[in-house]
Image: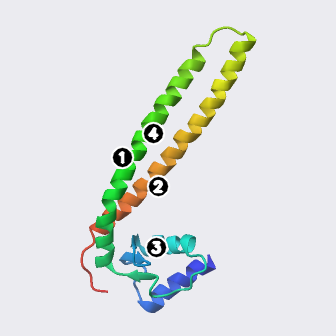
Amino acid sequence: MQHEARYYDFINALLPGTVNKHGWVVANCMPFYESGTAVQYVMSHYPEAKPSDHLIILNPVRCRELALVMLPEYEYLLEHIEKQQETARERLTATAAQRDAIQGNSIFNTVEKEVLQEQLRERIGVHSGLIDAWQTAHARKCELWNCGRLKDERI
């Protein structure tokens, strides 16, 4: 947290009053709409980095350009995740139906139900992971969309 405060202090020292402006670029390749998101990215991907005007800058024009290039990739990624979710959902439904169709209380049926129940747990985990991935990718797509709408601003 102290390291993050240093970045905010640095941004304010470099360009006073710009923390709330939009159109940040990290490492000249990653566009971010807000400075907070850019700082979080720096903290997680460059934990040992020192504040530098070359690592995180306010540049709405470059931010918009990068976002417009990256946006189609995120749209493709979301489509791919949605297809995988559908497949996972179908497998989950099929396994649940198979488990529910087992009749009787023989040892074989009990063991088969336990095996299918374990498969259901695994498939629920896969499906939940895909939901998390979709939410993360969708949030990033929305941020890129906002970056793509930035107007030329003077700093």
Instruction: Give the labeled residue for mark 3.
Output: 38
Secondary-structure class at tag 3: helix
Q: Earlier in the sequence, mark 2 or mark 3?
A: 3
Q: Earlier in the sequence, mark 3 or mark 1?
A: 3
Q: Earlier in the sequence, mark 3 or mark 4?
A: 3
Percent of width and height locating residue 83:
40, 40
Answer with mark 2 or mark 4, whichever residue precedes in sequence: 4
Residue at the extreme bottom of the image, as rendered:
13
Residue shown at the point (43%, 55%) measured from the top left: 137
Residue at point 30% right, 65% down? 69
Q: Amino acid at mark 3?
A: Ala
CA–CA distance between discs 2 and 3?
Answer: 15 Å
Q: Could you classify mark 3 by the number of other residues whose Cα lies within 10 Å: few (under 14), some (14-19), or many (20 or more)?
A: many
The residue pinned by badge 2 equals 136
Q: Secondary structure at mark 2?
A: helix
| Residue at image mark 1 | 79
Quick one: SS at disc 4? Answer: helix
